[in-house]
Image: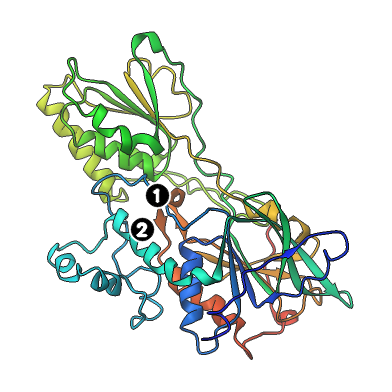
Amino acid sequence: MTSAQHSDKSLEPLSGSDASTATQVYDLVCIGFGPAQVATAIANQESKTPVKVLFLERKPSFSWHAGSHVARTRMDSPFVYDLATIRNPRSAFTYVNYLLAQKRLIEFANSDRLNPLRVEFEDYMKWCAQQFQDQVKYGAEAMEVVPESENSVVSEWRVTVRDAKGAISVVRARNVVAPSPASNDGPKSNPLPSVDFLAGQRIISMEDYQTRRNELRGANEPPLNVAVVGSGRQTIEILDDLLSCPRFGNITVVTEDESLVPLQVLSDQEPPQPRLCSIWAKPTCDQKGSVTDASELVQTIYMRAYEKQVASRGQLGLRVVVGKDAAEPCSTSNFIIRDTSATHFSSTQLLQSLDALVLGCRSKGDSLEEVQFKRSAVAGGCRVFLMSANSEGGRSLAKDIAITAGKVVEALSPGSGVRRDRVVAQARI
């Protein structure tokens, strides 16, 4: 068994006398244990020279939107964009091998759908994660990454960790992978609409939608009017599920996601202007959609909405309101399904103590960036990566996560280091 497969997950207690002398030093510490980090664990195990790695996960076990998958919803990408196939088609951790282990490979092939069911893909990722239990410290939340210097040059990183009971400890690493920060320009939660409970209005969290789904889909007279308030992939999935049931009345969605209004007036549009952002966040721009750019799911929503309108002779239909004010659009709804998801974890505060050292970030793919440091400030074998497998509000996976996980592991292999003073980095303002 390699050293990576037999990682010691004990953390050094943080107290007055020994706070600066933790004995355990890992080659790599990954903050979080989501899809990107599981892909990193797979790539490390399949490397010719696996490194000593530790994953710090604040949740008690692996999960990926557990319990919030709407029935029949599928991944946006085909099954080959799993945690391993694109990097190593012969890997034991491919989605095909998972199906073989579950004795469903032939049935999946006969289903004639390349995109896996979302609930099954989560089970696949759990199946992968369970094989790395000895490398993961669950219930451990990383609080801060601090540089440790030797002769005025950073030689390693000290990660402060808080466990589920509130105890503080430290772990040291030569390399750190932190989550990519959430964009400050992404969709934000809409203000809570005024609710008239005496008129029978009720609010349901999107996280509770699955458990209360049958309550809504009963035969009601008059049919229930339902509003959906939120932005992102989950809003679209719930809207599609509501429209699949003919028993509902009018359906309203209040959102800041303009992909839900793909039909635009055919006119010359000015090109989107990029926005400046902080050093830890990626720039974004205002890009409006079009009919041809709409996803298959959005097209299905409008098809079902049109069928609903025809069947009711124009009495019932779908209303899409783009904006933040949900009070008026939801005023006639019996139930309001609202996005109450927590704010995404941001690396900015976690890596705040690195600000004086940072020059910029160098992109290594859609889901990976390497932090570039000032000349001679950080030793060559000491790196920080920003990595995330998530896109579309976290409910879709970046297609390159298997490749970028391999790049991280490859960068840690002996002899792969590149002199940092020869790397030209473009700093972000």
Image coordinates of residue 94 in percent, x first then y, are: 34, 74
Q: Is residue 285 left or right of residue 377?
A: left
Above or below for 292 versus 12: above
Q: Quadrant of the C terminus?
A: bottom right
Secondary structure of the residue carrying tag 2 is helix
Secondary structure of the residue carrying tag 1 is loop
Q: Which mark is residue 128?
A: none
Residue 28, by quadrant, is: bottom right
Q: Residues within 10 Å of mark 1 (few under 14, many from 20)?
A: few
Above or below for 423 versus 193: below
Q: Amino acid at mark 2?
A: Glu
Q: Separation of disc 2 and disc 1 at Cα?
A: 8 Å
Q: Which mark is residue 122?
A: 2
Do tag 2 and tag 1 residues touch (Cβ < 8 Å)? Answer: yes
| Residue marked by disc 1 | 66
Above or below for 192 versus 128: above
Q: Is residue 33 left or right of residue 169?
A: left
Front in this rendered view, residue 148 or 273:
148
- The answer to whether residue 365 is seen in the rendering is no
Q: Amino acid at mark 1?
A: Ala
Q: Residue at x 14, y 33 (%)?
A: 307
Front in this rendered view, residue 385 or 100:
100
Q: How many marks?
A: 2
Q: Residue at x 79, y 75 (%)?
A: 375
Q: Residue at x 71, y 53 (%)?
A: 167
Residue 226, by quadrant, is: top left
Image coordinates of residue 346 in percent, x first then y, are: 62, 51
Circle nearer the N terminus (2, 1): 1
Q: Residues within 10 Å of mark 2 (few under 14, many from 20)?
A: some
Image coordinates of residue 385 in percent, x first then y, are: 62, 68
